[in-house]
Amino acid sequence: MPTKDAILTQLSKVIYPNFNKSIIDFNFLQSLDISKEQITITLDIPSSSNEIAKQIHTEIESRLKFLDVKSLKINIIQPQVPMPTSSQGKNVLPNIQNFLMVSSGKGGVGKSTTAVNLAIALAQQGKRVGLLDVDIYGPNIPRMMGIADKQPLFLGKNIKPIMAYGVQVMSIGLLVQRGSSLIWKGAMVTQAIEQMLEDILWDKLDILLFDMPPGTGDAQLSLAQSLPVSAGIAVTTPQKVALDDTIRSMDMFKELNVPIAGLIENMSGFICPESGKEYNIFGKNTTEPLAKNYQTQVLGTIPIDPTLREGGDSGLPITVLAPHCDISQAYRTIATKIWNRLEEIHQEGGVDNQKIQPTIF
Ligand code: ADP
């Protein structure tokens, strides 16, 4: 029989599908029992996909084949993913269960950073996730997801999303000519969004996140008219001017009949790494009263942290670079709260976008 160390060495070479870390680095090994006759490996993975479990199973078998293993038993524990389907009205993407609008009242508050890390957190929790960057004024998702140099694959007029960190990604930034400065007029925005929704070949997804342009406008309206948007979240910094603009985002959700899942307070305080002292550069905990006003919740607060900025610039988001740090954990907690809220929304009857369809005179 091989030693425990020999088995662990082999297991540490088994890469978790769609990521670049092993099942050991991700801490998925729950137990390893070696008896005279049998080796039993139990893993607890965050993905509910049978395909992922099968890939891991095959990879372990092939790695242990070279050790003298008489009998091998592999147990893979997986979460159950509920499949809510209650929304009605116009839906141009029926193979996707949930649509989440990630909005902000103004630019630069960390909306794209939040969208990226939440998408990865949801994928780490076993959901099949897509991320569509419709931020026409600053499509940063390709850089943040490390795919800025990738060319999307065109199949006729259709486009395949690019897989990055377990998330299917597409961005308007990969589709319009790089460096071209487009002036987006209202009708163009609507047309671009409708065309992206039509042309991108998403797999069956549990959730598709939209990184929206900041503010409230044509993009939000055409999206809500094309899909029963399951929920919206607003990202804000704690300062007054950002909160004032966030009010407009919340009013927009109400006007578009998009259920509000909550607010995220980003850049909430800064802890000096040298002194450990906290500085509230933009303020802190100011979002709660706004959430109350709209009968919703603050899903979480994320501090200012250089790793977040560096991760965005280098294409290695913090949830991938340091999946066990406090901030990555905070993103996963927010992801869980959003998923719970989505379940609630579906239990309450889901979303119907009939009322906001364009009126033809
Ligand atoms: P938005 O999408 O709202 O325009 P971004 O997500 O592009 O904002 O963020 C703007 C800049 O701030 C980016 O350089 C990003 O890396 C950085 N950033 C966002 N959130 C944080 C944070 N909590 N700590 C440090 N830098 C952050």
Image: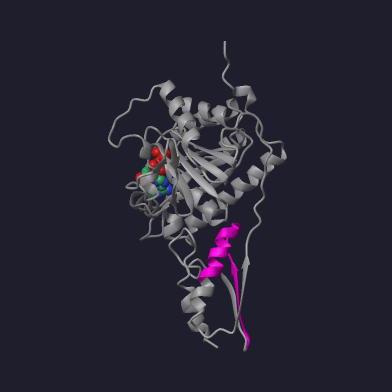
Counting the numbered discs, the total is 0
Range of residues picked out in magenta: 37-59
Quadrant placement of the N terminus: bottom right
Residue found farthest to the front: 156
- For the point 39% across and 22% down, the residue is 185
Residue 258 falls left or right of residue 179: right
Residue 38 higher or lower than 160, as above or below:
below
Residue 283 falls left or right of residue 232: left
Residue 185 falls left or right of residue 200: left
> Is 92 within the magenta?
no
Q: Position of residue 168 (x, y in %)?
A: 48, 48
Front residue of 279 and 358: 358
Quadrant placement of the C terminus: top right
Q: Position of residue 319 (x, y in %)?
A: 46, 56
Residue 345 quadrant: top right
Residue 334 higher or lower than 181, as above or below:
below
